[in-house]
Image (cartoon, rainbow, N blue to C red):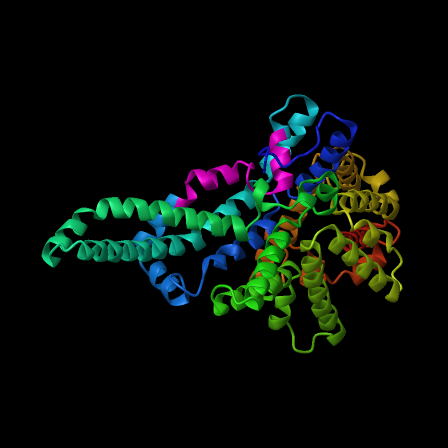
Amino acid sequence: MKTGRNKPFRTDTLAGRVTDWLNNSVGAIMFFNTRSAVLQTISSINFVNWSDNNIYQAGKAFANQPQYWKDFKFLFNSDFLMERRGGSRFNVAESDIADAAKKGGARGVISKILQAGFLPTQMADSFAIASGGATFYRNRVNSLIKKEYNNRVNEYLKQGIPAKEIKKKVDSELNEIEKLTKEKAFLDFREIAEESQQSSRPDRISAQQAGALGRVVLAFANTPAQYARLTKKAASDLINRRGDAKTNFSKLLYYGFVQNLIFNMLQKATFLLAFGDEDEDEKKKEKAYLSTINGMADGLLRGMGIQGAAISTIKNVLIKISEEAADPVSDVLDFSPPISSKYGKLQRAYRIYKWNKEEIKEKGFSLDNPAYEAAANVISASVNVPLDRVVKKVNNVVDATQENITPLERAMLAAGWSEWELGIQKPKKKKKKKTRSSGRGTGRSNNRSSNRR
């Protein structure tokens, strides 16, 4: 807060370069990540409150479509949201990538590519803030105008001015009142957005997040950290009887549970079980529900900082050991998402090569050679050029064109969810028996399962 910067170390040092290299893996993960963009839009409901933008008032403001879209356009094109879309106020990792993109050389070029890859998430973030904020902004403007109007009337009454003259006087000041209240309403809107959304503002992140270790351990924890702070403050205010008890309790419930539940159910596609077959395997449902609960716990723990991330990692390692999982190493490395990502990509590349040796030799320079996917993962892990994301997007589009899937599943495949996450299984057993020697059937299936990490 003293310097206006949230990077306490120099990037030209060895530690700075290694941190930037690891930090850029976040950009590789987020490169045109449409699933992240879809999940970003759920934060639009963060602007609903118990006062001037309650559910009824928000619905009423939304019903006035001409005014709603006028306010949406104003907020979406405001300097605040344009700055967020520029990468300088979105989150810590993207802010660093945006700064590195301004420099020359290979590192600057790679950072520029990664910065461009944040576009879908940035646009979804701005859409969520502007769409949810439009009703808040309009209702806050109306409530402030009413409050200021009444204050001036009461002030003039105290001065002994006749009521008829007061009305004329205050009406003549309406333009000034509207200007002042719009400025105040926008500031209130901005504070809520940066309080409940990802932000790289130095006064909105912790010392741990700004530190070198925090950048490596707390990647993707910006939003959980914001929610953890809001939850802690709401609980403290509730215990110490500060503010409105209803507002504090609702914040505690919403940011501590509801928002977390919605995010994890969408992230893991658990909600699809509600539309699935009633005879679906109960073990599969139970596993999906437990995975969602575990994801919620991880979000809460990582929001508490490095210590919480350590507890989350130990918890997940113990779960894998109890399940007799073959590879708990990935869960140990999950302590640092960037390192875990690089390990996972190298592991996928190895598995693709191991399972498809014969096919790789037979295909040669054919476009459907699995070697390209393996090479893309190695390149992404080593130099952070997100070629693996390009391959994944192509696979998503191809998977979305298959038959015998529902329109919802098709849309989610196109948006970035994988087949295994949606529980889609292709009837390939007969094909596997016929092509066992070629390795194609097992390679495709096992590669799918490897993408779970």
Q: Residue at x 63, y 54 (%)?
A: 224
Q: Nearer the viewer, residue 6 or 291?
A: 6
Q: Nearer the viewer, residue 371 or 451?
A: 451
Q: Above or below — where is 277 with respect to 359?
A: below
Quadrant holding the N terminus: top right
Is 87 within the magenta?
A: yes
Q: Report whether 171 appears left or right of 215.
A: left
Q: Nearer the viewer, residue 235 or 137?
A: 235
Quarter holding residue 257: bottom right
Quarter holding residue 239: bottom right
The reply to whether residue 452 is visible in this rendering is: no
The reply to whether residue 290 is visible in this rendering is: yes
Our reading of the magenta stretch's main secondary structure is: helix
Quarter holding residue 57: bottom left
Marker count (numbered): 0
Q: Residue at x 62, y 67 (%)?
A: 272
Query: Residue 170: percent from the left, percent from the top?
Result: 18, 51
Q: Which residues are magenta?
A: 75-99
Q: Above or below — where is 396 with respect to 260?
A: above
Residue located farthest toward the front when viewing the structure as drawn: 159
Is 65 within the magenta?
A: no
Query: Residue 437: percent from the left, percent from the top?
Result: 89, 51
Query: Residue 81: percent from the left, percent from the top?
Result: 47, 42
Q: Above or below — where is 84 with respect to 99?
A: below
Q: Nearer the viewer, residue 119 or 414?
A: 119
Q: Report whether 95 appears left or right of 346.
A: left
Q: Residue at x 70, y 66 (%)?
A: 293
